[in-house]
Amino acid sequence: MLTITEADRYNPALLSFEKNQSITLDVIRYPAQINSKHLGWVIPQKTKTYSIHYRQLDYGNFDGFDEDGYPTRPYSSNDTWLNGSMSSQAKFFHYGLSAGIFYSRLSDSKSLVFTCTLGGMILLEKEKIKIGIAFRNFGKAIRAYSKAEETLPYSGALSISKDLAYLPLSLNLDLEFIGRNRQPDISLSGKFTLTESVFLRWGINSDKFDQQIKSGVAKDLITGTGVGLGFKSEMYSIETGGYFYNPGNWLFGVSAGFYR
């Protein structure tokens, strides 16, 4: 399920639904001691909503070796992304555009890429349905790791969200087509409102079948599954969640926000 903190990356049209200014900090811990940080600022105006996002993914430090296997100096690797977005609406149609600079470093090798994402969303209020479409990661390499011709991992996505009439549950179905891959990535997720301020998130995706290690029914059942618990008031929000790649590898994240 898409949240405001990830909207600029996946579908910036969602930002136009935000009515309050907010500042959000996210921290995610991946397997193999990989860490991710995100700082976002969403700024609603009269007819448009703007946002600025800073992200960093740290892959850690590594021992270096030359071609003959002799130790050399240690090295590190990380990715940094500075992104800005704008969104608005025309009656029932919401739209948005985000663009930014993606900087990647592996030891002394560096890469710099300009990326952009375009998104739209149709809101059917009577049916309580949202239909979204997005085109992600289009752009151009300003500086590449090597002289080899490489294309960005662009993708197109279609999503449908439905608020159930007799349950405090919102269901979401997402289909993402990555590059020239014939088979789309499919995700099913939901947000269950426990009280006015407390909610529960869950989700599964089609990677579940590739990630299973056949170590038992119970263990394979949680593979490819994500769960999260959150709290939101008029001024603050905090959310925590995890995703299970398989029983031995899972990521954990915490998000905190301030609204005014």
Image (cartoon, grey):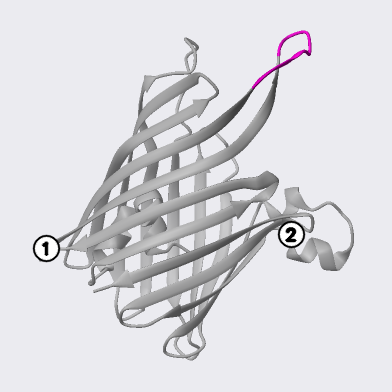
Of labels 2 and 1, earlier in sequence is 1
Label 2 belongs to which residue? Answer: 223
In the picture shown, does residue 69 fall above or below 38? above
Label 1 sits on what residue type? Thr
Q: Residue at x 58, y 49 (%)?
A: 185
Q: Residue at x 44, y 62 (%)?
A: 2
Q: The residue tagged with tag 2: helix, strand or loop?
A: loop
Q: Is residue 107 left or right of residue 47?
A: right
Q: Main secondary structure of the magenta part?
A: loop
Q: Is residue 110 left or right of residue 211?
A: left
Q: Which mark is residue 47?
A: 1
Is residue 155 visible in the rendered image? The answer is yes
Label 2 sits on what residue type? Thr
Magenta residue check for 124: no
Binning the other alpha carbons within 10 Å of mark 2 as few (below 14), some (14 to 19) or many (20 upward) gives many
Q: Is residue 214 left or right of residue 32?
A: right
Q: Is 241 in front, or is 245?
A: 241
Location of residue 169 in the rendering, given as x and y in whole percent from the top left corner: 50, 81
